[in-house]
Amino acid sequence: QLDSKNVYLLLGSNLGDREKLLTDAIAQIGNRVGMVFAQSSVYETAAWGKEDQPSFLNLAVGVETLLSPLEVLREILKIEEELGRIRKEKWGSRLIDIDLILFGDMVIDLGSELQVPHPQMQYRKFVLAPLAEIAGTVIHPVFGKTVSEILGILDDNLTVT
Ligand SMILES: Nc1nc2nc(S)n(CCO)c2c(=O)[nH]1
């Protein structure tokens, strides 16, 4: 349909039965957000932002949705709550975390409520590596570069001595 959008989400878990939580989250996303048309492999990654916590499992999913960005946000927050995420500290450990990374070619800035594309995605290999697997040729609407190009730039910068 013309009015559907391809949304890319980054899922993460670093507590409990991480694999099962990710699987359950994907099922819920398929029931409530739209049709899951792609999912990346699962990456084990060191905690970013606040290092003194268990490592994460991350994966990216592509969903075709008819929902608005705020409706998608509302659904993923409900899925996090239902799967048991207790929002303790900002960058603390969590059973499940679902971040909205890209929403078609939309650029949205609702401050702390919602920013699309995700304002940190270009700094986060745990986002770019899984996302490049399923959306490597997708163009970032602000940078005008593909996800794979952005990953390449991050890798080059990280290898700068
Ligand atoms: N490796 C890794 N580190 C993280 N730090 C935070 S916060 N998160 C939650 C997503 O923002 C993650 C994550 O998903 N993976």
Image: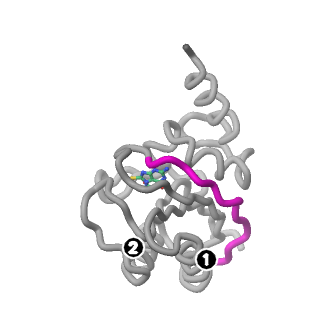
The amino acid type of the residue labelled 2 equals Leu
Closest to the camera, between mark 2 and mark 1, is 1
Give residue 133's position: percent from left, percent from top.
Answer: 73, 51
Indicate whether 146 appears above or below 105.
Answer: above
Give residue 64's position: percent from left, percent from top.
Answer: 66, 70
Q: Quadrant of residue 58?
A: bottom right
Residue furthest to the left: 88
Residue nearest the observer in this picture, 140 or 18: 18
Q: Mark number for residue 113?
A: none
The reply to whether discs 2 and 1 touch (Cβ–Cβ < 8 Å) is no
The amino acid type of the residue labelled 1 equals Thr
Indicate whether 26 appears above or below 101.
Answer: below
Q: Which residue is mark 2?
A: 77
Instruction: Give the residue at x 52% y 54%.
Output: 101
Q: Earlier in the sequence, mark 2 or mark 1?
A: 1
| Mark 2 element type | helix
Instruction: Give the residue at x 56% y 72%.
Output: 22
> Is 40 inside the magenta-drawn segment?
yes
* Range of residues picked out in magenta: 34-47
Give residue 105's position: percent from left, percent from top.
Answer: 59, 51
* Spatial CA span between label 2 and label 1: 16 Å
Give residue 53's position: percent from left, percent from top.
Answer: 38, 53
Instruction: Give the residue at x 48% y 54%.
Output: 55
Residue nearest the observer in this picture, 49 or 64: 49
Q: Which residue is mark 1?
A: 23
| Mark 1 element type | helix
Q: Quadrant of the C terminus?
A: top right
